[in-house]
Amino acid sequence: MSKVGNFGLLKEYLEPIKHQFDHILIDCPPSLGLLTINGLTAADAVLIPVQCQFFALKGLAALLETIQSVQKRLNPDLKILGVLPTMAEMQTVMTQDVLASLKKRLQNIHVFEPVPKSVKFAESNLAGEPINVYAGDKKLVQPYQAISDFITAGEK
């Protein structure tokens, strides 16, 4: 932890193998510790999941500040792919307000289609199956498909 260059360890380990893959996804914990900084330092782009709750908006502000700091000091090429609203209960006022706030505050950042709240995500995790296999519900999978389409469209 205290070694010089510890923020670049993941990037260092990925460098020799990254040419073998079209994309490498790095899932970081929801904290701004060493693991997340390593992920941001190694990444080309970041997708920011945000729960459709007001407290999550405060966490988003802190994360955006951290991303700016990483861009300035460790990874100037890091881009923000977009924000993915999660656990959306579309019929609630809170979800509608959070989505409106995201679109208003993040005018230069793509806000993806929200992922609906569903117990099926936890169940599929417990079953060890991907959500598209476990649930077979297109409305649960569609937001992730939209992200994949967005990434591949940017490559053309």
Image: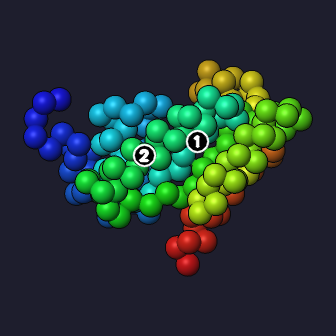
Residue 37 shows in this picture: yes
Name the amino acid, label 1.
Pro
- Where residue 14 sits: x, y (%)? 27, 51
- The residue sitting at 34% across, 49% down in the picture is 69
Q: Residues within 10 Å of mark 2 (few under 14, many from 20)?
A: few
Among the two numbered marks 2 and 1 on one chain, the one whose residue lies closer to the N terminus: 1
Left or right: 125, with 13 as reference point: right
Residue 128 or residue 62, whichever sits in front? 62
Q: Is residue 78 above or below residue 119?
A: below
- Where residue 133 sits: x, y (%)? 71, 38
Query: For numbered disc 2, what is the local secondary structure?
Result: helix
- The residue sitting at 62% across, 28% down in the picture is 55
Quickly name the residue at label 1.
49
- Where residue 142 sits: x, y (%)? 75, 50
Are discs 2 and 1 less than 8 Å apart at CB? no
Residue 42 shows in this picture: no
